Amino acid sequence: MKVSLFVTCLIDTIQPNVGKATVEVLERLGVEVEFPEAQVCCGQPAFNSGYTKETIKAAKNMIKAFESAEYVVTPSGSCKAMFLEYPRLLKDDLVWSARAEALASKTYEFTEFIVDILHVTDVGARLKGKGTYHTSCHMTRLLRIKNAPFTLLSNVKDLSMIPLPKAENCCGFGGTFSVKMMPISEQMVDEKVTSIEEVEAEYLIGADCGCLLNIGGRIDRLNKPIKVMHIAEVLNSH
């Protein structure tokens, strides 16, 4: 089986280790991974800010970049959710609407692909310690991917997973929200850090890099001894 990796901007520019872990896990599961070099930003920042024309330009580029892929896999629920917006953005374009639908239908979030397409629930990972999981808004509310991450984490050897209090609450990132509404965002992420501390977690695990950067940044500023990890990194641990 061959997949095309949609690596996302945050991973490409800030957290390349997450992209590396994603590839290594998939290859260990027998998947051939390719990387279309024509991919750029999916257009989500422009879309969230109301710049429709710019978003459509980005969407068309991404549709072309992944058109020949059998499957598209991304370690970001947020960015997969953006691909699902393409059919609505291009619904009145006879040429591009079907192409947008095709891309949306073959795109999978990383954990969703492993559990639902590969039918794997144990990737052979090992990580000693106590962890808790942040359920990001895009993953749970838009994609409704709720079970796959927990299924995979439950089979990581030596990792004790503790439910996160108030897990349904947003971490305060929300893309441009964290910039435009900084005081509110800060209070939201402080609440999230407090919840993590309540369960005495050594690891805060998540599947969206935006959330992890936001929470991790606050943890660093507060000098808390908590390691922030993307779920791909956890599943690549031995």
Image (cartoon, helix red, strand yellow):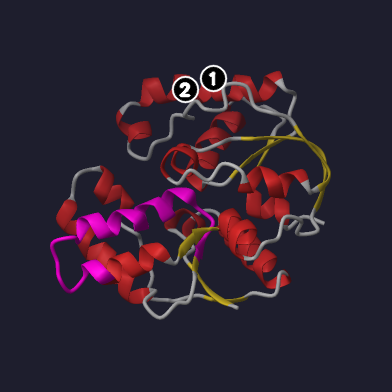
Q: In which quarter of the view is residue 212 placed?
A: top right
Residue 188 image label: 2
Q: Position of residue 183 (x, y in %)?
A: 38, 20
Q: Is residue 67 left or right of residue 236?
A: left
For the residue pair 56 and 40, the one nearer the viewer reads as: 56
Q: Are marks 2 and 1 in contact (CB under 8 Å)?
A: yes
Residue sitting farthest toward the bottom: 68
Residue occupying image coordinates x 22% and y 67%: 97
Residue occupying image coordinates x 43% and y 55%: 80
Secondary structure state at the residue bearing disc 2: helix
Tell me if residue 195 comes above or below residue 62 in the rendering: above
Q: Is residue 80 left or right of residue 150?
A: left
**What's the residue type where badge 1 is placed?**
Glu
Residue occupying image coordinates x 38% and y 70%: 39
Q: Position of residue 140 (x, y in %)?
A: 49, 39
Q: Residues within 10 Å of mark 1 (few under 14, many from 20)?
A: some
Q: Quadrant of the C terminus?
A: bottom right
Q: CA distance from mark 2 to mark 1?
A: 5 Å
Residue beneath label 1, please? 191
Q: Position of residue 182 (x, y in %)?
A: 37, 26
Q: Quadrant of the N terminus?
A: bottom right
**What's the residue type where badge 2 is placed?**
Met
For the residue pair 93 and 218, the one nearer the viewer reads as: 93
Residue occupying image coordinates x 65% and y 25%: 196
Q: Position of residue 135 (x, y in %)?
A: 55, 36
In this rendering, the count of numbered labels is: 2
For the residue pair 218 and 154, the one nearer the viewer reads as: 154
For the residue pair 41 and 124, the one nearer the viewer reads as: 124
Q: Is residue 121 magenta?
A: no
Q: Is residue 97 magenta?
A: yes
Span of residues in magenta: 73-98
